[in-house]
Image (cartoon, rainbow, N blue to C red):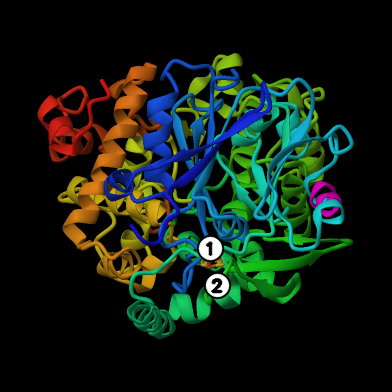
Amino acid sequence: MKGVFNKIISINLTDKTHQLIEIEDEIYEKFLGGRGLGVKLFTERVHPKTDPFSPENKLIFTTGPVTGTSVSTSGRMSLVTKSPLTRTIFYSNTGGMFGFSMKRCGIDGLIISGRADKPCFIVVDGKNGVTIKDASFLWGLNTEETYSKLKEMEGDRTHTLEIGPAGENMVKIASIMNDAERAFGRGGVGAVFGSKNLKAIVVKNGKQKTEIQNPELLKCYSKSALDKQKALPVTRAAFPLFGTAGVLHVTNNLGMLPIRNFQYGQHEKAHQTGGEAIRKEIFVKSEACYGCTIRCGRLTKAGNMKGKGPEYESVWALGANCEIFDLIKISQANYWCNMLGIDTISMGVTISCAMELQEKGVFPHKEVEFGNEDILIDLVKKTAYKQGIGIELAEGSKRLAEKYGDAETAIQVKGLEIPAYDPRGAMGHALGYATSNRGGCHLTGYMAAMEIFNAPKRIPRFTISGKPDLLVLKQNQSAVEDSLVNCKFSGYALGFDFHARFMSAITGLDFNVTKLLKIGERIYNLERVFNIAAGFSNADDKLPERFKKVAFKEGLSKNRVVPIDEMLEGYYKVRDWDENGIPKKRKLEELGIDFL
Ligand code: SF4
């Protein structure tokens, strides 16, 4: 099959060995690449009950047939591992240059297992192969320092994945940063690096290109995709001008921007932290992942610090969600999260959980109160270094709230903190949180695109009729996008049929929408059965009680609660799972899954 190298390097950090594994075409035909390939390889190699911090857990980094091609937004790659935060299988996705550069080394991915006896980093060199090097001199450095030292040592054209002190200290909400600017953000995946004594991965010197079956046709499709991106206001103007934070005024106006740990849905000061304010007050320049013309990233300068972001989710989690509206302090806290290697969403929602616990009188740190911007950076640092109060925050909101006897204050699903769309404002999106295989995630189904942003078409946000069917479709589509690998934002402008065209032109095989959706369904079901074997059940497909029982009293999402149980019943039927949410035997046979 064209578009891939059929090769993965498997690296064992315990005995410092590595080997080349051949991947047959048939695997790509059934799982594409990226997330799908990662899930296939992971579920074959890791027992569902494996402790995420044990040497037996693996980190599987993969690119896909679309990665690094002429398709705009194709500079992305995928990670699959078992999360220490959720204890589910965990898929994650990052942009930047690393995926493209790894593919240029003539491989489709890396499998990393074992545990080194002392800090190490891996170099994947397109000319000289794989080496595992001592990282004692890097241990303790933040992600920016690590990145610049590695560039100094390994050459200017080096690209890196690295952790900061949070990952080293196995903080359960630690991220893996990518060239110190983009992230595998969620699920505490940075702590899995730390548990393996792995500080960084370097790729360099890659010169190999995958063969494309029909380059002229691919160019033609790419050009037509670009025209579509240019025709749509959000991809032509809104994202390039205001970044992802440009959507903050939309969710706030619709009364579904979570405020005070999801106690309210809007705030009159929220606009002070939106994309327009970022553009006016701290913007330096826009930035992009490899080959992307949307350029949603930003370099900013807040006070005496410079850094990347803040993205919509970050500016909200560390801001409005904690009732903080000081853009400079929020941005600086965001920079610190990036430098220390912490997921901004989980950090912000864990802090807001602590603030609500304090408000209720059960959390003994008086200074941790809503609106106190002066403690933000200190809490981020204490979490990364597991100092004082940070020892508890480092566990994430679920474990924190359980410790203080008030589990419902943690706004999470399966242990993963819920992001910046209050579920009472979009019912399909709410169902997506409950049923995502990696917990409270907005990207696994991303119904908000249709329910809030009318992309690619508008559907009513409060109705529940038809939502399970649409969500299943979106979740399957999303699994495909993560496997190609292509950025989700391309989906705003492009129909799903574009992915089939890209894949056919690249691989030379006949892909169509139906075939791709079947692959997405296969990936989703395989993740589900892994989670079931790990001990998860329908009891975990649930939302925090406040979304079922407490409605907002004002704003455009007032008087709404989420009828999650009713929607779940429909969802299981559409998925062809039994009433307990377990995929039926016939469904697994149809998809060729023999996992359980
Ligand atoms: S739209 Fe943004 S996140 Fe997506 S590829 Fe482009 S720059 Fe990266």
Who comes first in sequence, dot 2 or dot 1? 1
Expressed as whole percent of the image width and height from the top left, the position of residue 306 reads: 81, 62
**Vertical arrangement, residue 162 with respect to residue 277, above or below:** above
Residue that label 2 marks = 291
Depth order, front residue of 24/451: 24
In which quadrant is the C terminus drawn? top left
Expressed as whole percent of the image width and height from the top left, the position of residue 188 reads: 60, 33
Write the start and end of the magenta stretch as one range. 145-150
Depth order, front residue of 376/215: 215
Residue 419 visible, this angle: no
In which quadrant is the N terminus drawn? bottom left
**The residue carrying mark 1 has its beta carbon less than 8 Å from ligand 1:** yes
Expressed as whole percent of the image width and height from the top left, the position of residue 194 reads: 70, 29
**Magenta stretch encompasses residue 94:** no
Identity, as a three-letter code, of the amino acid under mark 1 = Gly
Depth order, front residue of 453/178: 178
Are the two marked residues, 2 and 1, in contact with CB atoms closer than 8 angstroms?
yes
Label 1, secondary structure: give it: loop
Residue 209 visible, this angle: yes
Label 2, secondary structure: give it: loop
Residue found farthest to the front? 128
Q: Is residue 516 left or right of residue 70?
A: left
* C-alpha span from label 2 to label 1: 6 Å
Expressed as whole percent of the image width and height from the top left, the position of residue 302 reads: 80, 63
- Mark 1: few, some, or many residues within 10 Å (few <14, many ≥20)? many
Q: Residue at x 52, y 46 (%)?
A: 109
- Mark 2: few, some, or many residues within 10 Å (few <14, many ≥20)? some
Q: Is residue 498 left or right of residue 488?
A: left
Residue 75, label in figure? 1
Tell me where residue 369 sits by quadrant: top right
Tell me where residue 360 sits by quadrant: top right
Magenta-drawn stretch, dominant element (helix, strand or loop): helix
